[in-house]
Image (spheres, rainbow, N blue to C red):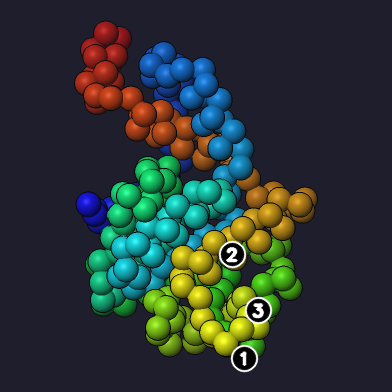
Amino acid sequence: LKFIISKVNYFYVCKMVDKDLLTYFEGYLTEKRKLVFQKVLANRTRHFTVVLEDIYQSHNASAVVRTCDIFGVQDIHAIENKYNNKVSRHVAKGSQKWLSINRYREDTDNTKLCLDKLKGEGYQIIATTPHDDSCHLQDFDVNQKSAFVFGVEAEGVSDYVKENADGFLKIPMVGFTESLNISVAAAIILQNLTAKLRNTEINWQLSNEEKENLYLNWVKQTIKNVDKIEAYYKNQR
């Protein structure tokens, strides 16, 4: 069972949260659930983000989505020049519900659109590839906001990404095999760098506004028939 990732604009526009509505919704949640949400939000970050360029293998895309959730990376950008990026529910284990996933497929130059957007938001573009000038994972400087671009296993990232990247990153390897599956590479990189990030004094956490908006969205996703419940609430006011 597969479904296509849909673009989520909600997360990028911090709106004023209706506190009374949120309190009403919270009545449908257990205290344990609310505490879990707050704990996860405290560890979410947009200091790092992940870009998937033409990843057509659903199991790989799904595993990366799950990895981002596990290590607290809130945003994923899916570039779809050639293929639709699909996620398997069985592999992602529901993690896609808690992430902000953006897709780029409305233009013939979606890679450029994505990179321009990220650079405009202050991210440096880091291509994950065994380039001659690649920085080794253990030497990577986590101070700057970074977008890590992953390409398909055989071809890697596109020439456009290589030509417009601000840097290159590779995982040191000492065996006969010269490449890693994308999902494995993403897990190694994100585990290493998010752990390193959290041991710094960098302001890597989400803003209070971002946390409030995400919390409301997560609460709504948890409640069955939430649209009917919200309509009932508004009719009673």
* Amino acid identity at mark 3: Pro
Q: Which residue is mark 3?
A: 172
Image position, residue 30 (x, y; %): 46, 17
Residue identified by numbered label 2: 188
For the residues marked 3 and 1, what is the alpha-carbon distance in whole angstroms?
Answer: 12 Å
Residue drawn at the location 72% of the way across and 58% of the way down: 196
Residue at 22 percent of width and 21 percent of height: 228
Query: Label 1 near label 2: C-beta < 8 Å?
Result: no
Q: Position of residue 32 (x, y in %)?
A: 52, 21
On screen, 111 above or below 93? below
Nearest to the observer: residue 112 or residue 200? 200
Q: Residue furthest front?
A: 176
Crowd class of label 2 (few under 14; some 14 to 19; many from 20; radius 10 Å): some
At mark 3, the secondary structure is: loop
- Front residue of 223/154: it is 154
Residue type, mark 2 in image: Ile
